[in-house]
């Protein structure tokens, strides 16, 4: 059972549809009571960092999520802004992040980007795993994913980097620490590759 955290930010239905296709049961959590007995969590997110953090903090689920993730060690995956929220803070806003992974969120340096339209980083790009991780099983070679972001996740501990992508230099497009996983790209928009990754998470 996958529990998707619905705090008013992110395309919940897209994840539900992916898991229906691979016959994995899904539950949507809109309150702390919905999180009871959760076994695996997805934290989606789009838009501005402070807005997403405010929405989550106001949802009534924050303390329960900290208990599940930090104490009970339930596997969780943050996606796009959901990943960025797992960091300590972000250059995009003033609020503290969840501090689930020791990282900070930085803005891309436009002077290092060769594309005509530099920001946001939008479209398909390579994701190269740097560790042998079950999350990327079957995606070790030639996997591409859909990105849409202006800020990136900078791990303070390089051992937490799970995969990298090139955009004006190399950045961590996936990270992890213990039971906590983060991916900067959108698997729900990445067709076959995203379906494999989300199915892999269900099997962790």
Image (tube, rainbow, N blue to C red):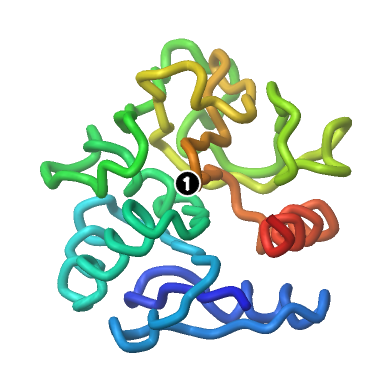
Q: In this view, does 204 lie above or below 148?
A: below
Front-lying residue, 130 or 178: 178
Q: Residues within 10 Å of mark 1 (few under 14, many from 20)?
A: many
Q: Where is residue 72 in the image (x, y as percent from the top left)?
A: 39, 59
Image quadrant occupied by the C terminus: bottom right
Q: Position of residue 22 (x, y in %)?
A: 82, 74
Q: Position of residue 130 (x, y in %)?
A: 69, 22
| SS of the residue under disc 1 | strand
Residue in view at x 48 percent, y 50 percent: 80
For disc 1, the marked residue is 180
Q: Is residue 80 above or below residue 144?
A: below
Image quadrant occupied by the N terminus: bottom right
Residue in view at x 53 percent, y 22 percent: 171
Among the 4 quarters of the image, the one containing residue 90: top left
- Is 123 positioned to the left or the right of 104 in the image? right
Q: Position of residue 114 (x, y in %)?
A: 58, 16
Front-lying residue, 56 or 2: 2
């Amino acid at each position: 059972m996958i529990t998707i955290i619905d705090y008013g930010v992110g395309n919940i239905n897209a994840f539900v549809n992916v898991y229906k296709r691979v016959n994995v049961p899904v539950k949507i959590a809109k309150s702390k009571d919905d999180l009871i007995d959760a076994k695996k969590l997805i934290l989606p997110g789009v838009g501005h960092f402070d807005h997403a953090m405010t929405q989550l903090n106001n949802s009534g689920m924050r303390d329960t999520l900290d208990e599940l993730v930090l104490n009970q060690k339930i596997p969780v995956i943050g996606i796009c802004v959901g990943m960025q929220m797992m960091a300590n803070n972000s250059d995009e806003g003033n609020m503290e992040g969840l501090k689930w992974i020791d990282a900070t969120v930085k803005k891309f340096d436009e002077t290092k980007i060769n594309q005509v339209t530099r920001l946001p980083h939008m479209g398909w790009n390579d994701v190269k795993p740097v560790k042998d991780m079950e999350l990327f099983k079957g995606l070790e070679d030639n996997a591409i994913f859909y990105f849409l972001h202006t800020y990136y996740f900078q791990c303070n501990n390089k051992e937490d980097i799970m995969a990298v992508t090139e955009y004006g230099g190399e950045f961590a497009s996936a990270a992890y620490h213990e039971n906590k996983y983060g991916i900067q790209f959108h698997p729900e928009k990445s067709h076959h590759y995203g379906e494999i990754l989300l199915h892999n998470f269900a099997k962790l």
